Amino acid sequence: MQGRRIRVRGQVQGVGFRPFIWQLAHRMGLCGDVLNDPEGVLIRVVGANLDGFETAIRAEAPMLARVDAVESTMLDFDPPEGFEIVPSRGQGAETRVTPDAATCPDCLAEIRDSQDRRFGYAFANCTHCGPRFTILKALPYDRARTSMAVFPMCPDCAAEYDDPGDRRFHAQPAACVACGPRLWLESGGEEFSGDPIAEAARRLACAEVLAIKGLGGFHLCVDARQPQAVALLRQRKRRPDKPLALMADEAAISRHAEVSTEEWKLLRDAAAPIVLLRKKGAALPEALAPGLDVLGWMLPYTPLHHLLVDAVGGPLVMTSGNLSGEPQVIGNQEARDKLSAFADAFVMHDRDIARRLDDSVERMTRQGPMVLRRARGRVPGTLPLPDGFQDAPQGVAFGGQMKAAICLLKNGQALLGHHLGELDDAVTWEAFQQADRDYADLFDHRPEWVACDLHPDFRASRHAEATGLPLIRVQHHHAHLAACLGENGWPLEGGKVAGILLDGLGLGPDGTVWGAEVLLGNYRGFERRASLTPAPLIGGDRAQMEPWRNALVRLDQAGLSEWADELFPQAPRDLARQAARAGINAPLSSSAGRLFDAVAACLGICPIGQSFEGQAAMRLEALARQAPETSAEFTFDTHGGVIDPVSMWQQLRRLQVAGVGIAPIAWQFHAALADAFAREARDLVEAGDAQAVALSGGCFQNALLLDLTIAALNDLPVLIHRKTPANDGGLALGQALIAAAHRLG
């Protein structure tokens, strides 16, 4: 009989797509079959109204599906009686893989229903929710290729799995208490014999620290309402100031945070990210996020988390379970070995985690959502390549040294991998190498080229060199610019844009450290049209953690050395100045990040040292948001493409002497910086040299700076990051696009 062969491409495995096709075909009276293969979903079908069938595939696709293409050709074949789901074919992947998804309402209702056989079961899931990428070992996506393979289904689960009318029809992780993963609590090497959830809640109420095995790794958990528990966790983990993520139900979040409609939508997304929310209402311990006006909140996203939050009845700290600088722990024995010094007890289970995934972190701005850390729930989602890149050969880019992530280009898609961390750490470096192998094997990736940062000493750069593939080195800020262009679908031949790139540091082609630039360029190249006046980074890397060093050199440049002496009397100023004059371990830098540190230090924010990257700048932003918005009074002088902060420092000093509070001063600095760089970019657009303005670099995670910069651009076309990080977590995407443009010619 004559029918159709229909190929569906996209995020179509692990989302209940074959059961959906089965049900659709039966509803429409069609015959044929459906299967998974490396390219996605393949359908053979005969019957009437095949056009309507194809239309319904797109219109009615399952909630977790993302259909990229539906392609059909005529086909002669002998169909079976009715419609069948047949076994998968092949290995490897040309298709997209579904990220892990938060517990759906139906599964949540079951675990709370005392009459349901999954009542209180910590691993309930269905085709609409549950683990995907964190349990996947190979493609196509079938149970035998996941860490659920060791759990044979009981008769009841098998009946659901085989029933086309059940929402667990072909749900690969489906399980119950009789056949699935087991949960337990252990302490001191002994397993607790009672209800692990009830015992965990009791221990949390007693201010104990628990290590809890979740979806992509272990969390360290305490009751967020208890200052002594928060202090104990910080003391044990040696994490004095870095904000701690919180998990709670919607009622608890409403009691402690200001949540807009858009933020609720983000919290309730299937990805269940951590969302930064303004503090409001009932106060929680200041030690959760010292000096900040926001807290990072997430909803429970597995049945285990829901059961625990229900039992505790209040918000929980859920911070990454790891040694300082290392990636998150994922194995049970690994947790015992590494987290025993932190945790009083462990909540464990026996479902292996195939790959570690941190929680994604996002925030809502006036321009929409912004991804700060791309991880669980967002990865391995792909981005379509812009027009002009469709014929780009397969390649891979390895990002930078910090916030490492890998990007694969294949078949018109870019796959930006999960957040890995700082490659200075040996264990993170091992995780990076494993991720490279993992992505290549899982997605059957065979790169023809490799891209990396211009800095030759980055571990990612050395890794790229060792591949032996044709290598394209990409300047750091050019990569930031291209990442922003790519996310926004800017065509390969779309013309040049003015890029405002503000971040911590990146090696420039002139050998200096860049970090505050206006570039005119596209994927194929760039010109540096404006930049911040450089200043020495006294002590090299130490300048990133000791803000007084940046303040000292900036105040000296502004003729305010006496003020610097007053501000930092205990610091080794003479030695620092000698090093700056001699250029000894004091490379020149135009870093915007270090300018933020300098202003913060002069306002008494972390002047001598900060305990985590960005601490001073985050506190400065929080202060600035407390001030009423007024017209900008501070100015940067610009001459010959050099943006000079000398006059800004002098104006800042005058306000400080006049007794103006630090919040208005912090706001004035943000406004002046935004205006200075927006003015340079605006001139390029108005002169016809650029078609739009792109904003990228880690400083644009600062929502206030982003808003002020966009306002200063006077309604010009502006491209910003929403789905990929503006920080170095998006760097590999830009590198990959620049390298692809180079290969395409």
Image (cartoon, rainbow, N blue to C red):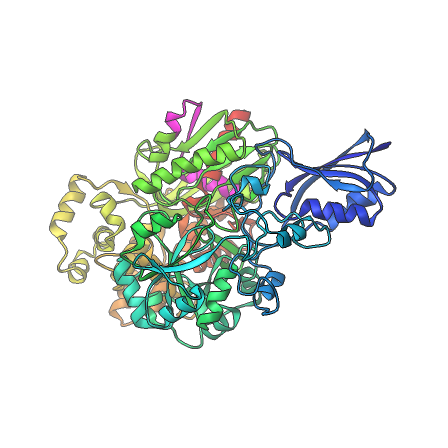
- Confirm whether residue 7 shows in the render: yes
Q: Residue 512, how many percent across, how many down? A: 30, 37
Left or right: where 27 falls relative to 623: right
* Residue 663, placed above or below residue 179: below
Decide if residue 599 is on the left or right side of residue 446.
left
Percent position of residue 327, x then y: 36, 47
Compare residues 443 and 124 and report the one nearer the observer. Answer: 124
* Residue 476 part of the magenta segment: yes
Horizontal placement of 168 versus 57: left or right? left
Q: Please state which of residues 707 and 52 is positioned toward the viewer in this rendering.
A: 52
Farthest residue in the bottom direction?
282
**Residue 368 sits in which quadrant?**
bottom right
State the residue at coordinates (60%, 28%).
Answer: 391
Q: In which quadrant of the rendered image does the C terminus lie?
A: top right
Q: Residue at x 36, y 54 (%)?
A: 321
Q: Is residue 19 left or right of residue 682?
A: right
Location of residue 643 in the rendering, given as x and y in whole percent from the top left corner: 36, 48
Count the marks.
0
Q: Which region shows up in magenta?
A: 464-485
On the question of residue 291 being in view, the answer is no
Does residue 536 show up magenta in the picture?
A: no
Residue situated in front as seen by the camera: 575 or 165 = 165
Q: Residue at position x 67%, y 50% from top?
A: 169
Q: Quadrant of the N terminus?
A: top right
Residue 351 lies, with reference to residue 291, above or below; the image says above
Residue 171, position as x, y percentages in the image: 62, 49
Instruction: Name the residue rendered at 23%, 56% in the picture.
Output: 609
